[in-house]
């Protein structure tokens, strides 16, 4: 993304958008380029902004945000928002079937 500088503002020449700082323009430009320079060292997920990586680590990899799998045979701890996906994928074969119908 090409830029023009007017004082302390950065201007995106392609869209005519102005930003208060060149940092804000650089960060915005990453959305267009797909550049995600901040990578989580635990899971490899990448982020445009460092603050998003920090939030990710607190929300996903923080021990306090993890919950235990409900199945007694597992006990694995996963992020709360991934619990149902974990049960579906890890324990799909452990489902119980009704002996009176196909369900």
Image (tube, helix red, strand yellow):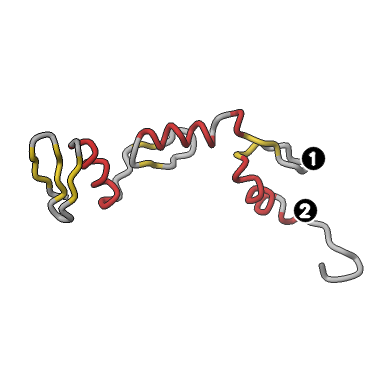
Residue 94 marker: 2
Picture quadrant where residue 76 is located: top right
Residue 41 location, x and y as percent? Answer: 44, 33
Q: Relative to the observer, which residue lies in front, 24 or 50?
A: 24
Q: Earlier in the sequence, mark 2 or mark 1?
A: 1
Q: Along the horizontal axis of the image, is 69 left or right of 35?
A: right
Left or right of residue 53, residue 70 in this image: right
Residue 61: x, y in percent?
Answer: 54, 33
Residue at image position (77%, 53%) is 94
* Mark 2: secondary structure: helix
Q: Pick whichever, 66 or 28, lies toward us.
A: 28
In the image, farthest residue toward the bottom? 101
Q: Residue 97 shows which numbered tag?
A: none
- In the picture, residue 47 is in which quadrant? top left
Please give the label number shown on residue 72.
Answer: 1
Check disc 1 and report its element: helix, strand or loop.
loop
The residue carrying pointer 2 sits among few (fewer than 14), some (14 to 19) or many (20 or more) residues within 10 Å by Cα, namely few
Quadrant in which residue 23 is drawn = top left
Q: Could you tell me residue 1's position as x and y percent?
A: 17, 50
Residue at 21% x, 42% y: name it. 25
Q: Is residue 71 left or right of residue 16?
A: right
Identify the image quadrant of the C terminus.
Answer: bottom right
Residue at 63%, 51% (x, y): give it. Answer: 85
Check the image and name the residue furthest to the right.
Answer: 100
Residue toward you, 14 or 73 = 14
Instruction: Give coordinates of residue 18: x percent, y percent.
Output: 17, 45
- Crowding at label 1, few (<14), some or many (≥20) Cα neighbours within 10 Å? few
Left of 71 or right of it: where is 14? left
């Amino acid at each position: 993304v090409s830029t023009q500088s007017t004082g302390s503002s950065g201007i995106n020449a392609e869209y005519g958008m102005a930003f208060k700082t060149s940092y804000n323009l650089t960060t915005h430009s990453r959305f267009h380029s797909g550049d995600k320079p901040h990578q989580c060292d635990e899971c490899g997920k990448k982020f445009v902004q460092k603050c998003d990586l920090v939030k990710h680590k607190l929300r996903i990899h923080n021990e306090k945000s993890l919950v235990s799998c409900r199945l007694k045979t597992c006990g694995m701890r996963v992020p709360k928002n991934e619990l149902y996906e974990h049960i579906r994928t890890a324990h799909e074969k452990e489902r119980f079937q009704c002996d009176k119908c196909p369900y």
